[in-house]
Amino acid sequence: MDLESTPLFDRKSSPPPSPSKAQAAPTAPPAAPAARAARSPVATPGKAKKGDAAPPPAPSTPAAPASPTNGTSAPGAPATESALAAPAAPVFRTTAAAMASKQREISVSEFFAKNRHLLGFDNPRKALLTAVKEAVDNSLDACEEAGILPEISVTLQETAEDRFRMIVQDNGPGIVKQQIPKVFGKLLYGSKFHRLKMSRGQQGIGISAAGMYGQLTTGKPVAITSRVGPGKPAHYFEIHLDTARNQPEIQKETDIDWAPPHGTRVEIELAGRYQRGRASVDDYLFQTAIANPHVTIHYKMPDGQTADYERATNQLPREPKEIKPHPYGVELGVLIKMLVMTKSRNLRGFLTSEFCRVSGRVADEIVAAAELRESQSPRNISRDEADKLHKAMQKAKIMAPPTECISPIGEDLIEAGLRKVIKADFYATVSRPPVVYRGNPFLVEAGIAYGGDLPMDELVRLVRYANRVPLLYQQSACATTEGVLAIDWKNYELQQSRSALPTGPAVLMVHIASVWVPFTSESKEAVADYPEIEKEIKLALQECGRKLASYLRKKQHLQYELKRRSIFAAYAGILAKSIEALTGVKKERIEADLDRIAKKDMPELSEPPAGSAAEAGDAATPEEAGAAAAPNANGGDA
């Protein structure tokens, strides 16, 4: 009998019959009294009457399996409690209005204060190096832009355990009074971000981030002293960065007596750790002196020791010129923004005035390919029309961008820089011609120093640069390392294990110069792996490798000749005595003639022996042979 379909049935007056032995056979046990009461809509709580039957005992067999997730029971199985129970009402932890009230704008300085590892301040040792690096880079940029030969002093003072005061002073043009608080107390503030021109700094983050790190770890402000000219006052500031608003707070401002006629001095106290060796402040200044032979650096270490790197040349690097964007390097969103902000009245004028290498003829071809009108106003271009214009720009044949926006070191100055700090037996340098990636011109320079006091049984040291700035971290993630590993250095007389740097007494230097270096992160520690960049790195190093292989083969040939002539000289006396007995010529004269013959045509390392060029050519691939004939950045043959 179905209890649910019999509303007149009263469990109190007529209890259900007890199950028989035959009915007790199924494995599914009868429901417990509590569960039965929960399922019956007519059951009422209360004490059982005297005549009521006792409830059956609780089953000892396992519970029946749960019902399917859709709430229906399996065919032939009895209904379970979970299948018949009503779904629970959702419990809200919060509301949309409450969540909206918690949302607020995040300041860029507040973001980087919490994620300072993105800027290179992820451990005390690296933080000290990054602070020095940012200050020195700014000083070099300022001096070169003003046409001043840089002279920089770096001082590290240990004020407590793992706490240092960093002082960097330069002889640059100085900073005007109104700009000092913003330059040192506001992130993303600078003049180099929107310029297509080679420079060390790009983002306007570096020195202000170093001051922010010092403020977070020591609570002390940044101290700045600057003077713009001999007859001008020296301004002294103490600046605190308000991370919530990304605004500087001036804690002290005054004019002071300062001896230098012009320049800037920065003092930051920060938590750090000083340690010598690779990827240290010492190593950074050492590498900076190589790539910047025109700079003089005075360095005072925390223990009182000093190191001076005198300039190797009085010639400043060529001043790079700012260029306009190239059509190949502009994305659709940037193009739409340029169309809105341009002052040109028609589309033809927009293309010729806002981009480089776009002549009137090229502009007409682009407009025709995009099916637009030359007289159309750029501000009235729709999004679809801008998309057509962008695709037409990418397909048009346009000359590569000009290269006066980059300033290479040059082969002679690279060698001068290597000779200044590395004592070796052989030097080779290469400066490749400029090429383009994403519409941005760049060039690669490379150098090798071999022999001398360099260790014989260690891996070759790789020194990486981007716009004359040493890259000390993330070597394995850098395109420079990929370019080195892509070369079989056994062809150039260097031992190499699989997927590793070559072994030998050598230093490899690679420099990438570009208007916009594609760094992998804001800390500017590694270059992104663009195929164009890696190819140029490989070609430059292969050219240096051929010069090194020629030198080593000449050296081997010289050693062989010396061995042959030493054997000849060992028997010269016996030969002279025999000739004297046969001819009657005096022995001394014969020995002098034999000595002259032995020294005749003695090969020198400055000139290759016969066959060396052919051997080097046999080892080169066709791609390398073509690269060797390419002109370098100075206009001559490589």
Image (tube, helix red, strand yellow):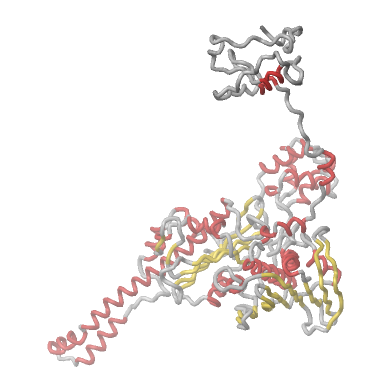
Residue 155 appears in the picture as rendered: no
Residue 203 falls left or right of residue 432: right
In this view, the residue farthest toward the left is: 582
| Residue 141 in picture, x, y percent from top left | 71, 69
Left or right: where does residue 446 sit relative to residue 457?
Answer: right
Confirm whether residue 112 shows in the render: yes
For image coordinates 73% across by 64% down, the residue present is 209
Depicted 126 relative to depicted 296: above or below? above
Q: Quadrant of residue 221?
A: bottom right
- Left or right position of 247 against 573: right
Residue 524 image offset from top left, x and y in percent: 65, 60
The quadrant of the rendering that contains the N terminus is: top right
How many numbered marks have been drawn onto this rendered protein structure? 0
Q: Quadrant of residue 584?
A: bottom left
Which residue extends farthest front? 50
Q: Position of residue 86 (x, y in %)?
A: 73, 23
Measured as percent of width and height from the top left, residue 632 is found at 56, 62
Query: Nearest the camera: 624 or 636?
Result: 624
Q: Residue shown at 41%/60% (left/top)? A: 496
Q: Measuring 86% from the left and 79% from the top, which residue is drawn there? A: 255
| Residue shown at 75% from the left, 76% from the top | 265
Dividing the picture into quadrants, the one containing residue 237 is bottom right
